[in-house]
Amino acid sequence: MKLTRRLFLGSMGTATAATILPAFPAFAQDRSIRHFWWGNPTRDKNTFNVIDLFQGANPGIKVSGETIGWGDYWTKMATQTAGGNMADVIQMAHTFIHEYVGRGAIKPLDEFVGNGIDLSNYDAGANDVGTIDGKLYGINIGSTTQAIPYNIRAFEDAGIDVDTLAWTTEDLAAACAAITEKSGGAMTGSEDLSLYLENFEVWVRSTGRDLYSEDGKLEMTAEDVQSYWEFWGGLRDAGFVEGKDATVILDKGMADLGITKGTTAMTFRYANQVGAVQSLMTDPVGAARVPQRPGTGNGHYVLPSMFLCMTRDVGDIDAANAYIDFWINNPEALKSLGIDRGIPPSQMGRDAIEPTLSDVDKNVVAFFGGVQDQVGPVPNATPKGAGEVRDAFMRTGTDVVLGNMPADEAAGQFIQDAESILIRANR
Amino acid sequence: MFRFLRRNAAGYVFLSPWLVGFVFLALGPILASLYMSFTRYDMVSPPVWDGLGNYQYMFEHDRRFWKALQVTFTFVAFSVPLRLAMALGVAMLLDKGLRTIGLYRAIFYLPSLLGASIAIALLWREMFGVDGVVNGALAMIGIEGRGWITDPDTSLYTIVILAMWQFGSPMLIFLAGLRGIPRDLYEAAEIDGTSKWRQFWRITLPMLAPVVFFNLVLQTIEAFKTFTSAFIISNGTGAPADSLLFYTVYLFNEAFKFFRMGYASALAWVLLIIIAVFTALAFATSKYWVHYENERD
Amino acid sequence: MKTNVIDRSTVADPEADLAHEIRLRQKAREKRARLLKHAFLMLLSFVMLYPLLWLFASSLKPENEIFGDLGLWPSQFQWSNYTEGWNALPVSFTVFYANSAIVTVLSVIGNLLSCSFAAYAFARLTFNGRTFFFALMMMTMMLPYHVVLIPQYVLFLNLGWVDTYLPLIVPRFLAADGFFIFLMVQFFRQIPRELDEAAMIDGCSPFKIYWAIILPLSLPAMGTAAIFSLIWVWEDFLAPLIYLNDINSYTVPLALRLFVDQEGQSAFGQMFAMSVLSLVPVLLFFVAFQKLIIRGIATSGMK
């Protein structure tokens, strides 16, 4: 493929190329790699800054930075994968890493660890989620954990005094009631989290099970689902959480959240996203633990909000290794990246970003430190089809929220649907 | 051979850009997608032959396929006539001599310029939400509103309204068509004392028939393929309760979210057949109502 | 003026008086109708404009007010969304506009030329397989684009065209968009056939007929096609997304997508500001080109 491209360009001549073709990195330097990530203006600036730093330190290697927003990223990624033209280094999300690794699109990195990529600074266990079937596929470039972002002013106004790092579902229900009553109904306590599978995951894990078993079957049960939907249904019926009209909007972006619109005091996100919530609000935002039922175990876990992966289509492996290593070990690079991608999974990284933290960042870092003793083991790998199961969860849950189906019946149907989805996806 | 060339040369010369593009750029991918529809293809590993498996699953097991069909047919049935009526009505209003006409034309085209961006999605949800502008306006005339866009019974119709609101392109085509109608026909009718209503049926509509036909066919095709508006407004999910699960939204998710490009291709070819049937019907009936100026077929 | 008319009518004979009366009433009725029409159009204009007003208002709001406060009026006018938004991305919008301009101008030229060629063949020339090819052309419009995306990507990759503008421009010179062909066919068929027959007898070549008769008589259709073509190419998002990798080659719609991260930090205010600006070129073009549609009344004189 590469050969064809070169031949074609060579025969075309530079005159036409100059007018029609954008800059072609392949000819500028001898060695080049492509790095593809999903981003936003801040992240893009930070990342291009790291690329400049890297190129300054490695004059022989040219890095082509490629970026686009989250939703479009996966369409383009799938297309490039199908064409055998993936970038050398890509950013991965924990929701997709199993889909790509399971199909052989990602290169295992074990042979390069200590031999091009230095992971000695990393916290113990920081790369557990990125290790699949005993091989390291994704390097953690920012840790995160589940979180309940909450409106600090609303909590204070309603006189809620509870340790949000240790609270229970009962405390959450009481807080929702207090906030709703205090505001006269203008602001409810929380979004109705019935349809957030990620929040439900904590609920299941607190019983010691995972969503999926080690061999890729369902481990969550109809009872888990039913109890979860009934818990939120109770709050919904009492009017302490947002009404059904807001709830049935799925996959909400930052702008759709009750907390950013000012209609609720709480929502569910990952810790690294709390800063983004804050940027759309005037009231200060804090991060709370996902409350658990009294007497249950630790449902939270630490996961990489993003991974850095090397792809099947990588060209210059040494250059890619050098780049990845620079990314995770160079203090200047780490400082430039900040906590936009999550908390650096090494002490060295955390030291590097320390002076750059904003107020909300400090809250997040403090929260992250605070939940460390409450996190459980990393969950089993999700099987192929997990994304579709998540969709089914939201879809069946919508029927419950809209009152079309009782929670017990819906829970049974969801489990049934999920099982057939897994069978079809793993044929 | 020589006679063949002489009879056909001009036609093929003029057709050649299209022909070259079709053969070299379009045909291959189209056939490839047909092939993929008989395979299981996750886009990472090579496709695996599956015979009629995809089609069989679609018709026998896939509830969401039927749901998507239902949503899409409902949308087509409502949006196409409404949008065309709106476009033709406004085009006729704008056709005749108002001095500020250029301004109006630009204003009416603006919504179509906005397309289906993230901004439109946010705005639509805001307008048709529980506390939105629409409910505010309804409250003024004493009607109690609801969450139009979040209620599965009504959400689809907000997309129909969006399609109506973006009537700019058919309007422009109607305008161009109206401009082609000779003014003296109307002048003659005026002298005969024909009413405006009869003028519309006797002159405007028959003279405009080729353009109406074009708009009807194209709008139907586009309506069946409606993607972006529903995709963006439902955050790509077809929610609430699959009420915005347009056929192509379902197809896209099957392909790019769930890695089933083979199945998505099968879905696409079924849609192609459905659209082709409707288009063929339109062409077949057109000889009864579309007459081309001075054309002897 | 009006009083003049009445003054004269009082002294004139009764029959003329009646005629004046009728004409006056007719004028009054027409005026009422015109007022009604204006009122209706203005109301409609407001409905059509509201979303744009909302977009514009949002583009002037501070980031933390856009979604919390649904009113149209910003508490403070943050014009910096425009000035800073222009340079907020790693590459300036000047570059994105230049890229978009190159792609758009070439694409519009390509579309108009190649589609009018094909349309002329379909509408006016007889050749074997005309119906068959026309049906094929219609078929290309019916297949959802998403399923040919990957085969097409592989094709362009093998040609070495990925990360260049060629996949965006070349198909347009090869009449890839059936919409325009069909549109032009419908308009070409409306042109009286006597014209080309007469020209043919005079010894004109098919090309001469296309160039000297069909095109000049189809200005409304060509104007419409130019407007659509420009707007759609300018706003085209999927093809640039798939085929352009280097951020320096991004077009405006692609750049707009860099502002919003559903999962994290976004810059909505700047995104809205740049969205508003991105409408300006197309709107200007629209205003300029719509005259073509309106002026193209040549056909009415030909009968």
Image (cartoon, rainbow, N blue to C red):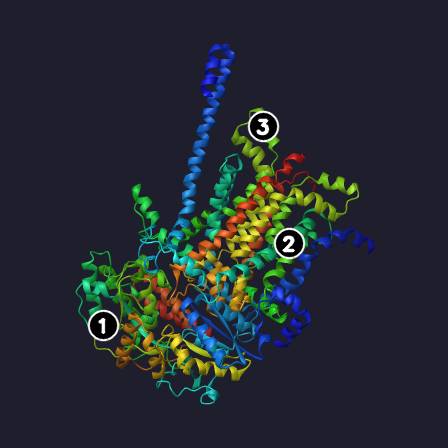
Residue at the farthest bottom position: A114
Q: Is residue B40 visible?
A: yes
- Given contact means CB atoms under 8 Å apart, are the residues at marks 3 and 1 in contact? no
**Residue C233, quarter of the rendered image:** bottom right
| Viewer-closest of B169 and A211 | B169
Mark 2 or mark 1: which is in front?
A: 1
SS at mark 2? helix
| Viewer-closest of A388 and C100 | C100
Q: Write down the chain letter for disc 3.
A: B
Q: Write down the chain letter for disc 1.
A: A
Q: Amino acid at mark 2?
A: Ala
| Residue at image mark 1 | A164
Mark 3 or mark 1: which is in front?
A: 1
- Spot occupied by residue C108 in the image (x, y as percentages of width and height): 60, 54
Instruction: Say whether residue A161 is left or right of residue B38.
Output: left
| Residue at image mark 2 | C135
Mark 2 or mark 3: which is in front?
A: 3
SS at mark 1? loop
- Spot occupied by residue C38 in the image (x, y as percentages of width and height): 44, 35
**Marks 2 and 1: same chain?**
no
- Spot occupied by residue B263 in the image (x, y as percentages of width and height): 52, 67
Q: Amino acid at mark 3?
A: Ala
Q: CA distance from mark 3 to mark 1?
A: 81 Å
